[in-house]
Amino acid sequence: MKLLVTGCFGFIGYNFLNLLQKKYDKELEIVGIDSLNFPTSRINHKNFQNTNFDFYQIDINDIDQIPVKGVDLVINFAAESHVDNSISKPIGFIDSNVRGVGKLLYWSLKNKVDKFIHISTDEVYGSVEQEFPGEDNSFNPSSPYSASKAAAEHICNAFSRTYGQNIIMVRPSNNYGIYQQPEKLIPYSIVNLISGKNIEIYGEGKNIRHWLHVSDTCRAIMTILEKSSENEVFNIGSGDYFDNLHIAKNLIEIFNYDNSRITFVEDRLGHDFRYAVNFDKLQSIGWQPKADFKEELEKIVYWYKNNEEWWIDSYKKTLNDRKKRNSLDQ
């Protein structure tokens, strides 16, 4: 089988690539594409070793430029994914997450790809007070990021219904783990503490997220692949619901600091209060979450402490981007 993995050196994509290599080694022919726009992605590319892997540094909007034939499966991880950045740079998110997905779907159609797996997000459901949306719930996205992901799903549905493409969409909850860019809450908080700064928490820190370890996400995608699902949608969750202040206090405890190392800052524009999903459907085909949040958080802290060369350049960029997070790029 020949796989095309887009965004292969991003956070979830790279973790999935490593799982593929570990589980199947030489059984699969893998083609990877990534724009390598982030310093962390360039390091991941440099460190990845696989003789059965062909790589093209390219944006998915330019997918027609790759000289690849005979692809059986496309797994699309490629996306702009940070809400803060979507507030200051919304057009880039539309270009990558909407137009790029359309170009990739069209390429797959022309090249007679058997199956297309699109990685979406639980944020397409929007903020929910008490509910646990299932796969059939309506969309209510509120940020440019989540709106772009919802739009991509509508395009996927259109290609499936119009052209008969076999498209599977997965909606993971808030992922955490190693190899996550330091713009996201957990790694940003960790590297701030490592660098002698405080954790920064938006508003009062009461916003709730559904925390899902990246290894569970990757196993879920693998389960969906191995079960040969067709034209399905799957939520991926863990049942771990924590607010941002809880995350901060857990990190403070791991570092043996006190609460004076937590700083509350101006809230994010349009900050969603709570994300949640029902993931019974995925469990019904044999998948279960395995990661223990507190244990994994300690491992993640240890990893970032010992891999400064991996995150330092991206961290500097994140610090600069944070200065204009609630304003449009001029």
Image: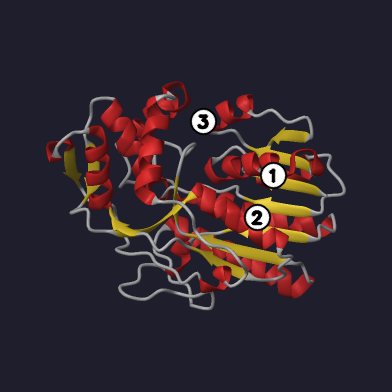
Tell me if I can see residue 1 in this picture.
Answer: yes
Specify the label residue 222 is tagged with: 2
Label 1: how many Cα within 10 Å (few below 14, some 14–19, many 20+): few
Question: What kind of residue is marked 1?
Answer: Lys
Q: Residue at x 37, y 42 (%)?
A: 297
Question: Please, is residue 210 above or below residue 87 in the view?
Answer: below
Query: Is the residue under label 2 in contact with that under label 1 (CB below 8 Å)?
Result: yes
Q: Amino acid at mark 3?
A: Thr
Q: Is residue 46 left or right of residue 289?
A: right
In terms of secondary structure, where does tag 2 sit?
A: helix
17 lies above or below 174: above
Residue placed under numbered mark 3 in the picture: 40
Q: Residue 127: x, y in percent?
A: 35, 67
Mark seen at residue 148: none
In 3D space, how far apart are the residues under numbered discs 1 and 2 (Cα atoms)? 10 Å
Q: Mark 2 or mark 3: which is in front?
A: 2
